[in-house]
Amino acid sequence: MTETLLMAEGLARTFEGSRGMFRRTTRVQAVAEVDLVLARGGALGIVGESGCGKSTLARLLLRLIPPSAGRIIFAGQDTTTLDERAMRPLRRRMQLIHQNPSAALDPRLTAEDAVGEPLRVHAVATGRALRERIAALLSEVGLPPAFLHRFPHELSGGQKQRVCIARALALEPDLLVLDEPTSALDVSVQAQILDVLEALRARRGLAYLFISHNLAVVRQVCERVAVMYLGRIVEEGPAAEVLGAPCHPYTRALLGSVPRLVARRLAPAAAGEPPNPAAPPAGCAFHPRCPVAVDSCRAGVPPLADLGGGHFVRCPRTALVGG
Ligand SMILES: Nc1ncnc2c1ncn2[C@@H]1O[C@H](COP(=O)(O)OP(=O)(O)OP(=O)(O)O)[C@@H](O)[C@H]1O
Ligand SMILES: [Mg+2]
């Protein structure tokens, strides 16, 4: 029996604001009805077009922003009911890796200082033990001691991302949330960082929530994948199945838009313009772009149906388009 590390139920987040000259009120449902389960040591990929809610989902799961509805269970605790003080011991167990390592690192701190900071703040180690711990962490991400005293401007993009990963590992987390961790890097460097991440997961039993536009990368790193469209998960299941034999018309469009699965970015995933998130289409939000939509697709948001084998799809037309 695999142990569940992270679970979300009915997770939702709405952003409200007023925009433009006439201060019109806008309401964007960035995340809606998200249920997910991440096993301890597992890797779940989140894919979907720009603006579909991937980063918002990541921030919700890390409790960096509160949800509008739903609950999140991390290591058996309902984090949606915890205040910041009660969250503190859990915070060190969940770490975020950003797309842009340059923005994540303080330009005034050397690699040694950056990796050592969380260890000092949490009084984990001092003096020689601290220095040894930092060197071991940097070595674990493939940076030899020569890099200890380098500042961010003296590091390449890939080396900076390695420092960010070492820093995230310092407090021995259970979960890394990786938000496009390699998309700012060259393809060759991207492969090296993915190797580092795969080795770390195997060695440390870390769980990954891995957000990426790159479906080939997700397939390499993750056992499971969830496809999001306008805030909702439209298909979820074993990565090889969802990306190898997709059922939802949107997942099919997403895959069709990636020539040979090596494209770095996904530009228009499906025919037609992506919808305005402040005025989403009624019913299945994908219906205006869907090649197999029928009138009933406008009627209501379809439920996530269980296809068996841990594969779920939010499309009643699946039986017609799947296979
Ligand atoms: N703080 C905010 N205030 C208002 N709207 C927001 C805020 N953060 C995100 N949104 C909106 O929520 C939706 C989802 O945004 P999010 O950043 O989660 O998308 P994403 O899938 O991560 O996109 P990308 O692939 O471009 O990073 C978008 O419509 C976005 O404009
Ligand atoms: Mg994002």
Image (cartoon, rainbow, N blue to C red):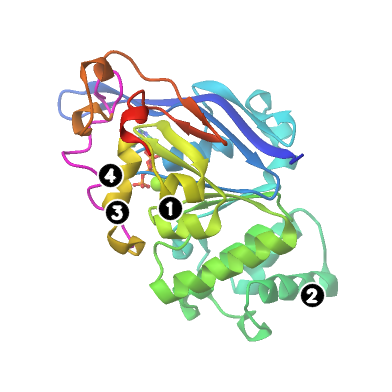
Q: Measure how far apart labels 1 and 3 are at the Cα level.
A: 10 Å
**Residue wearing tag 2:** 132
* Quadrant location of the C terminus in the rendered image: top left
Q: Measure how far apart labels 4 and 1 are at the Cα level.
A: 16 Å
Q: Measure how far apart labels 3 and 2 are at the Cα level.
A: 42 Å
Q: Is residue 300 above or below residue 148?
A: above
What's under tag 3, amino acid-wise?
Answer: Leu
Q: Earlier in the sequence, mark 4 or mark 3?
A: 4
Q: Secondary structure at mark 1?
A: loop
Ligand 1 picture quarter: top left
Q: Secondary structure at mark 3?
A: loop
| The residue positioned farthest toward the bottom in the image shown | 146
Which stretch did the figure color magenta? 264-285
Q: Nearer the viewer, residue 144 or 123?
A: 144
**Residue wearing tag 3:** 266
Task: Check contact, mark 4 vs mark 1: CB within 8 A.
Answer: no
**Residue depth check, mark 4 versus mark 2: number of the one nearer the observer:** 4
**Residue wearing tag 1:** 212
